[in-house]
Every structure is written in structure tokens, then in C-alpha cells.
Amino acid sequence: MEAISRRFFLYLSNNKVLDRLAKRWGSRFGADKIIGGENFSQAIPLITQLNQDGFRVTVDHLGEFVNSVEVAREHAQECIQRIRAIGYHQLNTEISVKLTSLGLDISNDLVMEHMELILSAAKESGITVTIDMEDSSRCHAILEIFKTLRRKYENLGTVIQSYLFRSEKDMDDLQQFSPYLRLVKGAYKESGKVAFLDKQMVDENLKHLIKKNLLNGHYTAVASHDDAMIDYTIKLVEEHKIPNDRFEFQMLYGMRNQLQSDLMEKGYTVRIYLPYGEDWYGYFMRRLAERPANVAFALKGIFSK
Ligand SMILES: Cc1cc2nc3c(=O)[nH]c(=O)nc-3n(C[C@H](O)[C@H](O)[C@H](O)COP(=O)(O)OP(=O)(O)OC[C@H]3O[C@@H](n4cnc5c(N)ncnc54)[C@H](O)[C@@H]3O)c2cc1C
């Protein structure tokens, strides 16, 4: 049942008609519980509050799979304005970007031009940028762009997904950069030709990658809401006396709020991934795929308005 509903919501996440309707209906699906507003100005008070409560943040402007040069340029401009606003309001937040929103599917030159602008603005303001990982067909291109840019910019991290067979080798290839890596299970619909379809294997591989990256001495962001992954990490760092400033936990805004606070109160760094923007449909559907229980608050959202 769980596997069927995951496939169903991942299928819906690619539906262009529903995407257009969702934009028109705004946050009627209950999306406002998991996104920080429709523009960055609306997200600023939320980030300020999260910072005051002791959390770090990474903020993501929603949007992906862009096919128009103009839209990709708008996304790049939006990123740069966001970086300036973060500096101006002295927010403790990094930014996350999706390369398909910046022109990855249009041309390599375009996405590189945008990333150079974003990274130099971020460097000036002392802000780290994480390149989110997207579906497996784009993984190689994203990692190649990461490597090229990482030679020039230290304020750059990326993501490794434990469901992909290729991930351990990718992590090994990135060792030379001592990279800031966010380790996740993976959120897209993938085939058994490239990814583990068995959840237990995805979980075991995530533990393996967490252990390898931490024991290699690289800063590690464990991005999961799963108690098993968090408990595993805590046990591992205690056993190997890895100090708290060598890793952090990351969770999505609106997911497992009590666990976020508990970890923070125990002295661990917790970073909240806060998405905002009008293009929330694909993100929202992937979250429903991960946790059908979220359907309850989505339905409540629709019928209570
Ligand atoms: C900060 C962050 C950044 C991410 N960036 C990317 C990225 O760049 N690319 C990408 O492909 N994916 C990304 N992801 C998504 C990730 O790949 C997973 O799809 C997602 O995190 C679900 O996996 P999980 O480890 O959280 O737990 P799951 O495997 O979904 O769930 C395991 C168990 O955890 C518990 N649980 C999970 N969610 C909840 C909840 N909301 N409430 C209560 N219990 C819950 C339940 O007991 C559940 O059975 C990111 C995730 C996070 C947290």
C-alpha cells in the first residue's frame, strides 16, 4: 500500500495540468504548513523566528525543470536578491538551489553563468550554497558542474542520495574537495536499473554513506526525519568521539517539529530546509509521496477554506 501511494504521488508530481491549477489555487492544499510563503519577504519573519529559536536554515526558492531562458534568468536574479536580503537582515541561513531552475535543461553555459553570479554574490556575503540533487538523469551533469565550481568557490556543497547505486562512487570522487555534503535517501521516482527499490537497502546505504563521510573527516549534513538514521548518527559520533561541529541534522520545515527541538536542545546543530515561492506543487507532491499521513492535513486544508 505504502509503495503504491508513493508511486501515485510521484506520478502526480510530474503532472503539468495539476501544477498549473495548483499555482492558481495558491496554498489551498495545505501547502502553507510546509512552505514559508509565496515570496522571500514572507519567509523573512519565519527565518528570523527559527534563528531566534536556535535553528539554522537553508532557504530554497521553489521551481524546477525550467525550459525558458527568461524564467531561468528570473530564478537567478531572485537568488541574488535573496542573498542580498539575507545579508541585510543578518539571517543565519544558507541557500539551496536546483540547477534545473537555473537553466540546466537549456544549456550548460547558461547554468554556469547563473551559478557564477550566485556564488560570487554569496561569497561576498559569507553565505554557503548547496546544490540540491534532482532525478538520476541529471545526477552526472549536476556533479560535474559542482566539481567545476567547487574548484573556484569554497562556499559550495551538494547532495548525495543513498537510493542510487552510483552514490558511493560519487562520494569517493568528491573526496578531493573535502566537500560539504548533505546525505539523503532520495526523493524522485527512479527505476530499478539505477536505484535500490527496497527501502531497507536505501536505509542501509544511507547509514553506510554517513559513516564513511564522517570517518573520512568531512563535514556531514544528515538530512532525514527517520529516527533510525538519527539514532544511528548519534551512536556513531559518540563511539568515534566526533565533535558536534563536524556534522548537523537537517529536516524539512513543518516535518517532525518536536524532534527538531529535542535535537537542538541536546546541543546538536539542526538546520531547517525552508522552501518558498509559488511553484510549490512538485515539492508538495513529493512530500505526500514520502508520508501519506500528510494527506490528512492537505485534505483538511482544502475543505477548511
Ligand atoms: C533537509 C532536506 C533536504 C533534502 N534535499 C534533497 C535533495 O536535494 N534531493 C533529494 O532527492 N531529496 C532530498 N531530500 C528528501 C529525501 O531524499 C527524502 O525523500 C526525505 O527526507 C524522506 O526520507 P526520510 O529519511 O526523511 O524518511 P522516510 O524514509 O520517508 O521515513 C522513514 C520513517 O521516518 C519517520 N518519518 C518520516 N517523515 C516523517 C514525518 N513527516 N513525520 C513523522 N515521522 C516521519 C517515519 O517513522 C517513517 O517511517 C531532502 C530531505 C531533507 C530533510
Image (tube, grey):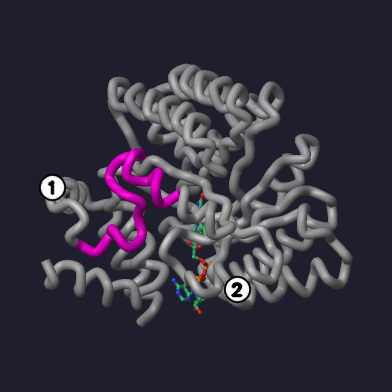
Residue 28 visible in image = yes
Who's the residue at 60% across and 22% down the image? 124
Q: Residue furthest bottom?
A: 1
Residue 29 relative to residue 24: left or right = right
The residue wearing badge 1 is 24
How far apart marks 1 and 2 lie (CA) works out to 37 Å
Q: Position of residue 177 (x, y in %)?
A: 76, 35
The answer to which of 117 and 168 lies nearer the viewer is 117
Who's the residue at 50% across and 48% down the image? 136
The answer to which of 106 and 249 lies nearer the viewer is 249
The residue wearing badge 2 is 262
The amino acid marked with disc number 1 is Arg
Closer mark to the observer between disc 1 and disc 2: 2
Who's the residue at 54% across and 22% down the image? 121
Q: Mark 1 and ligand 1: say if the CB distance to the nearest ligand atom is below 8 Å.
A: no
Q: Secondary structure at mark 2?
A: helix
| Quadrant location, the N terminus | bottom left
Q: Earlier in the sequence, mark 1 or mark 2?
A: 1
Residue 116 relative to residue 16: left or right = right
Quadrant for residue 29, please give it: bottom left
Queried whether the magenta region covers residue 148, the answer comes back as: no
Quadrant for residue 183, please give it: bottom right
Q: Secondary structure at mark 1?
A: helix
Q: Give, as a single range, the part of the protein colored magenta.
A: 29-47
The answer to which of 115 and 68 lies nearer the viewer is 115
Residue 8's label in the rendered image is none
Q: Position of residue 194 (x, y in %)?
A: 54, 55
Q: Position of residue 288 (x, y in %)?
A: 34, 67
| Quadrant location, the C terminus | bottom left
Who's the residue at 26% across and 44% down the image? 278
The amino acid marked with disc number 2 is Asp
Q: Mark 2 and ligand 1: say if the CB distance to the nearest ligand atom is below 8 Å.
A: no
